[in-house]
Image: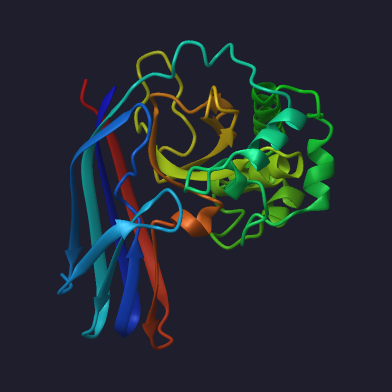
Amino acid sequence: MRYSVSHITTLKYAQPARMAQFNVRLRPAEWTGQTVADFTLSLDPQPTQVVEGPGGYHVNEARFVLREATAQLQIESRFTVEVEPLPFFVEDATGPGLAELRERAMKKPDLSDLGPASYIFASAIAQPEPAIAHWAGAFVDEAMPVMAAGRALMSAIHKEFTYDSNATQTDTPPIDAFNQRHGVCQDFSHIMIVAARAHGIPAAYVSGYLRTLPPPGKERLVGADAMHAWVNLWCGEELGWIGFDPTNDCLADTDHIFLGMGRDYADVAPLDGTFRGSSEQKMYASVDVAPLD
């Protein structure tokens, strides 16, 4: 499936900000089954220099500074992408049991940004939460194959939690969203990550997009109006990383477009940075994912 993707972000300050430094993570990182072409990043105002390179985890990052006073910044990214369907065997795959999986992950000599050991332990946002671990224990056990465990956690979140764009903010802790059983894709992904790691499953946060309009006869996926988030679980050497979307209770397939992967949202946030001053700021975003086939 081929798509044209556009993402426009506008950042406005109540008073002009000075020496604003930004990190933008909108160029898709390489991912199996996905081919990206014609990526462009447009900035207004245009900085004197943009430095692009890999981020801390499996994500691309563009860094720049606006030295002059700035009241508004507009960031526009565009690209085309071709997404291949999941391999036919994934739907029926089981993967190793959780006890074996944890042992494999810890012994695997891979400290790269895709190495499973980096995604077993706590991170800045996805901290251990006994309540989430206990809740997850009703759905998974040590002997369960990892694919079955991933589906069980994904389906439980989809069933028990309500998508509510007014319930949480970007900085809402996962335990707060868990306790109120309301949230958005970011919250559901963090909850699933905390639950999976509590039971020894390497779990990563994925930032990406969803197809905006569904194909004929299919329902529109929740979260298609903006950036989307889902969870990658490491399912052993044979399967590698598999995407689980708890917001829509489905595996990440041709409707999902991968941008980057990290331990949690903080590693792959589309935009962050600092500036001099204490001016209030507001951010507006518009996303469109149009099929080309």
Total residue callouts: 0
Q: Quadrant of the C terminus?
A: top left
Q: In x, y percent, where is residue 83? A: 32, 26
Q: In which quadrant will I find the N terminus?
A: top left
In the image shown, does 256 or 17 lie closer to the viewer? 256
Q: Is residue 101 above or below residue 19?
A: above
Residue at position x 65%, y 31% from top?
A: 154
Using the rendered view, name the quadrant where residue 108 is placed.
Answer: top right
Residue located 35% across and 80% down the image:
14
Where residue 219 appears, as percent x and y from the top left, is: 46, 22
Seen at 29% across and 58% down, the residue is: 53
Model colouring: rainbow
Q: Is residue 129 left or right of residue 61?
A: right
In the displayed structure, would residue 146 be above or below residue 174? Answer: above
Q: Looking at the picture, tell me which residue is in the foreground, 214 or 233.
A: 233
The image quarter in which residue 142 lies = top right
Residue at the limit of the structure toward the bottom, as seen here = 277
Q: Quadrant of residue 126?
A: bottom right
Q: Position of residue 137 (x, y in %)?
A: 83, 35
